Amino acid sequence: MDNSKTFAAIQAGVKSLRSRCEKFPQCQLESEPRLFYIPGNHDRLINKYSSLRVKVCKCLGIPLDQNDPAPFPHEYKDLLYGVFARHGHEFDKFNYEGGESFEEIDYLRVPIGDPITTELVARLPFTLRKNLQQQAHSIWPKLSDDEIKEEIAKANQNFQEIENVRPFSAVIEWLLYQMQQNRYLKEVIEDTISEVINVFDNLKFVKLWYERHDKWTDWRGEADKIQAALFLLRNFKLYRTEKLWELVFKGKDYFIKDDLLEAAPREYLHLPPDIQYVVYGHTHDPLVAPLRTVPSSPAPLQQVYLNTGTWRRRHWKATQDDSFINWKNMTYVIFYRHDERIRRNADFETWTGALK
């Protein structure tokens, strides 16, 4: 997706604000806004290739001092505002394979999240479309070719949304819901899931990853969670839908854990004492969490963790039935220096909106 028009609009809007503020002395902007780019787990290869870094700079409007820009930093720190920020995937063991030194070599190591995305999430709708095309006339014997194409496109679109299901532990429930809504596709969906999982499990990379991470001393480790999810998916055919739903519901807590919320307090161990706020993204879930109050002069230092969420459509599991409902969220955070609070008595503000 090309977001260059979005960033151009942001820059134009700020310049317009500056122009208007010049008419009112009490409203001043000290400098032009600066854009900082922090790579996330899906941007892993950008720092590996200078050609990609050049494209990012041009897209975001970041000044290019040379043809081979240095790798983008993985964290942002501002002592004046008391803010420390990083993407946050460093604490998600599915999407970060490096160590706690957080060197560039750590970020370039391939995590299991990459094949999960490409060989499970992306392969599922692709394989379903292939299987539906092969069996189309037996599944829809009374439909015309154009109507069949429309049905295949609809099913493909539905299964492309699997990455947007939240919480992620609800993915199996979402697949069950899709089968309930498309009972005539139940068999082909089951066969597709089995085919995709077999491809994933036989990847050399996945086998080696299991060997490194499957530890008998930690029965709730990352490898066990993946294997448990794949076990349920692989056995769709062996269980009645109601029985499988019961198993998923009982084991749901096994998959739920906010590793970033647990990691945020530990960040302060290596941060300057002036840092108040730790900011992450990655989870897609906006959050403001009070951490601790540290004695300090002239006032106690209140440490807070903030997550900026995401701007994309997500499918949420309904609380009262087995359905899923989707909408978009957008969250932004503003931090203030002490000398910027003359008319706005705030240290920070964060707002989350929903668009259905």
Image (cartoon, rainbow, N blue to C red):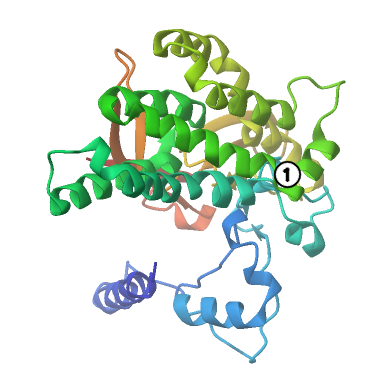
Residue ID at (26%, 50%): 153
Q: Quadrant of residue 315?
A: top left
**Residue 202, percent from left and from top:** 70, 43
Q: Is residue 171 left or right of residue 304?
A: left
Is residue 255 or residue 14 the one in the foreground? 255
Q: Is residue 78 above or below residue 82?
A: below
Q: Is residue 351 left or right of residue 309?
A: left
Residue ID at (81%, 47%): 270
Q: Is residue 339 left or right of residue 326?
A: right
Residue ID at (82%, 47%): 100
Q: Is residue 255 above or below residue 2?
A: above
* Label 1 neighbour load within 10 Å: few <14, some 14-19, many 20+: some
**Which element is circle 1 on?**
helix
Quarter containing the N terminus? bottom left
Is residue 242 or residue 302 the one in the foreground? 242
Q: Is residue 204 left or right of residue 38?
A: right
Quarter containing the C terminus? top left
Q: Is residue 249 visible?
A: yes
Residue type at mark 1 is Val
Q: Is residue 257 visible?
A: no
Q: Is residue 280 above or below residue 221?
A: below
Is residue 354 or residue 24 the one in the foreground? 354
**Residue 332, percent from left and from top:** 41, 50
Total numbered labels placed on residues in the image: 1
**Residue 13, percent from left and from top:** 29, 72
Q: Is residue 149 above or below residue 265?
A: below
Q: Which residue is mark 1?
A: 206
**Residue 90, percent from left and from top:** 70, 47
Residue ID at (36%, 52%): 343
